Structure formats: C-alpha cells, structure tokens
Image (cartoon, helix red, strand yellow):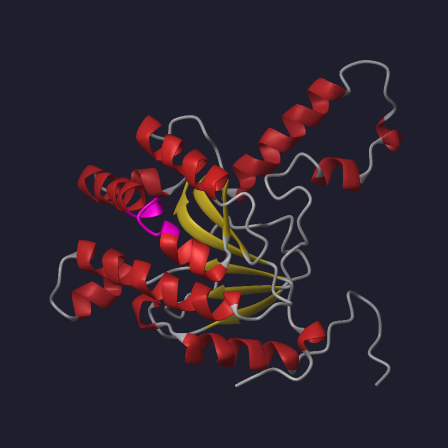
Amino acid sequence: MQFNHQEHLPRHIGIIMDGNGRWARRRGLPRSKGHLEGLKAAKRVIAYLAGIPSIRYVTLYTFSTENWKRPKQEVSYLMGLISKYLLKELPFYQEHDIRVCHIGRRDNLPDTVLDLLDQTAELTREHHGLQVNLAVNYGSRDELFRAAKKLAELHSEGTRLDEISQEEFSSFLDTAGMDDPELILRSAGERRLSNFLLWQGAYAEYCFHPSCWPDWDEETVKACLLDYLERKRTFGGLNNE
C-alpha cells in the first residue's frame, strides 16, 4: 500500500519497543530469544519505513538508563546483541541507504559497544535515506539534565535569563538539528512514555498497539500510520474544519 499524501505523514517517528520478554515467556522460551526476535522485528519495521521518503528519522528506544537495573546476565546479553549486529548489518544499511546515529549517554557504556556505535555512525555518515537513531543508554530526564548543565556552563556569567530561548536549549539535546517526533509508537499494550523523548514529544501523537514487539511487521506499522492520518493536530489551537 502506498500513501497518497506523504506530506501528511510524520517526518520523525519514535518507537518504544516493548514486550520481548513477554513474547518469549508466553512461548516457553528464554528472554534472550525474545530479544533476538525483537531485533528481527526492528529490521522489518525499519526496512518498511526506509521506503517512505517523507519519513526522515526513526528513533528506536534500544536500551534505557533504567535498563541497567535488570539482571546482569540480561544486560550482558543485550550489550552483546548490540555489539554483534551493529556492523554485521552494514549491508542492510547500505541497501536501504540508512544512516545510523547514537543518542544517549556515552559514559558507562562498555568501550566495545561505544566503539561499534561510533564506527557504524561513521560508516553510514554519507547515507542520505532514513536516519535511524539508536537510543542506547538513553533517558529523557538524563538528557534534559545534561542539556541544562551545558546551557548553565555556557551562560555562567553575563547572560540574562530572558535572553535564553527554547531553541537554544533544544540545541543541547541529543536530537539537536532533527525534527521533533510527530508520532510515538509503543508495543505490547503499555500506555506510558517510560522516560522517552519527553521534551521532543510534547506535541507528538501516540499509538499504543497491543502486539508484543517481536510480532510487529509492515502491516502493524501501516495501521499506526493510517490511524495517525485520521487525527487532526491543532497544537492548542482550534480545528476549523
């Protein structure tokens, strides 16, 4: 299915990929199998979205600042999964002209993971298709706090508070220079943001889908996009239609 009015589609989509563990548990499988199938789902979804030219950014909530609280074995597996597949998927990025970027804290990530994130970003830097932001070691409160500290350091002396704009503050966020997400998707029927793009998503539309993330495919995303196109966005104004 092709969308007739691509200009009405979101330029930036955020995705909270939830339910890998539940998907595995319901099938009597280890959680690691759910995470592996979740990776396959991410490829399906990204391949589909990369084929829609008007969509320029997708941000995948890959590993949050809170995920460090999980059992060490699971954290180690997730870091290993990221490390194993980042460069292995280079042919996939090339086929779809995908640029990969990292958002989130750099400190306390394993050096191997950080190096691979940087290598992947550099190797795909000249790609001009969809930009996929991997939110690894990312939390929106942490991002806002880091941005506020950078702004305070810059204006430690001689600047009036009324001279500081929201635009300047936004320039210190991890997503500086990108469109704010107009649509944020979450799988597995959960209806919360979980510390994801709180500033950027202030006026986003939200779609909470019941399917666990490993079950997502092109049809799932199509349904969310069609739902988005049915909505009227007024940004606090009036709908005059």
Residue situated in front as seen by the camera: 6 or 210: 6
The magenta segment is: 85-90
Residue situated in front as seen by the camera: 67 or 170: 170
Can residue 138 be seen? no
Residue situated in front as seen by the camera: 127 or 227: 127
The part of the image, by quadrant, that contains residue 229 is: bottom right
**233, above or below 142, in the image:** below
Q: Position of residue 180 (x, y in %)?
A: 66, 54
Residue at left offset 11%, top offset 67%: 28
**10, above or below 138, in the image:** below
Q: Quadrant of the C terminus?
A: bottom right
Whether residue 202 is in magenta: the answer is no
Is 35 positioned to the left or the right of 230 in the image?
A: left
**100, above or below 192, in the image:** above
Single out the residue that lies furthest toward the top. 157
Q: Position of residue 32 (x, y in %)?
A: 19, 54
Q: Position of residue 42 (x, y in %)?
A: 38, 62
Question: Number of labelled discs?
Answer: 0
